[in-house]
Image (cartoon, rainbow, N blue to C red):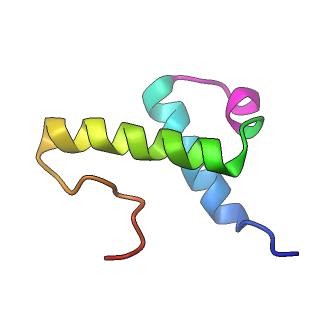
Amino acid sequence: MRLYPEDKIYEEAAFIGYYMHWNRSEILAMSHKERTRWCQEISKINSRLNDEPENVFDLKG
């Protein structure tokens, strides 16, 4: 079984908490898939507002 890196969880939680003002327990109760989706959606909004790459969490680049 492969675990999701702890540093990445903190990064996602901080990102969502900063922009959505949700508390730690709400964010950590989400599945990895759901947290990732929220990060993507927030990134899209920020990209449009700041004229930046669409997904700052995209590891392909």
Q: Nearer the viewer, residue 45 or 24?
A: 45
Q: Is residue 51 left or right of residue 41?
A: left
- What is the x, y in percent for residue 14? 55, 43
Quarter occupied by residue 61:
bottom left
Relative vertical location of residue 57 with respect to residue 33 in this rendering, above or below? below
Q: Is residue 11 left or right of residue 60?
A: right
Q: Residue at x 51, y 44 (%)?
A: 37
Q: Residue at x 67, y 34 (%)?
A: 27
| 50 magenta-colored | no
Quarter occupied by residue 8:
bottom right
- What is the x, y in percent for residue 18? 47, 33
Relative vertical location of residue 3 with respect to residue 13 in this rendering, above or below? below
Q: Is residue 9 left or right of residue 15?
A: right
Looking at this rendering, what residue extends furthest in the left direction? 51
Q: Is residue 30 left or right of residue 36?
A: right
Which corner quadrant holds the N terminus? bottom right
Q: Residue at x 73, y 66 (%)?
A: 4
Q: Residue at x 64, y 49 (%)?
A: 33
- What is the x, y in percent for residue 21? 52, 23
Magenta-tinted stretch: 21-27
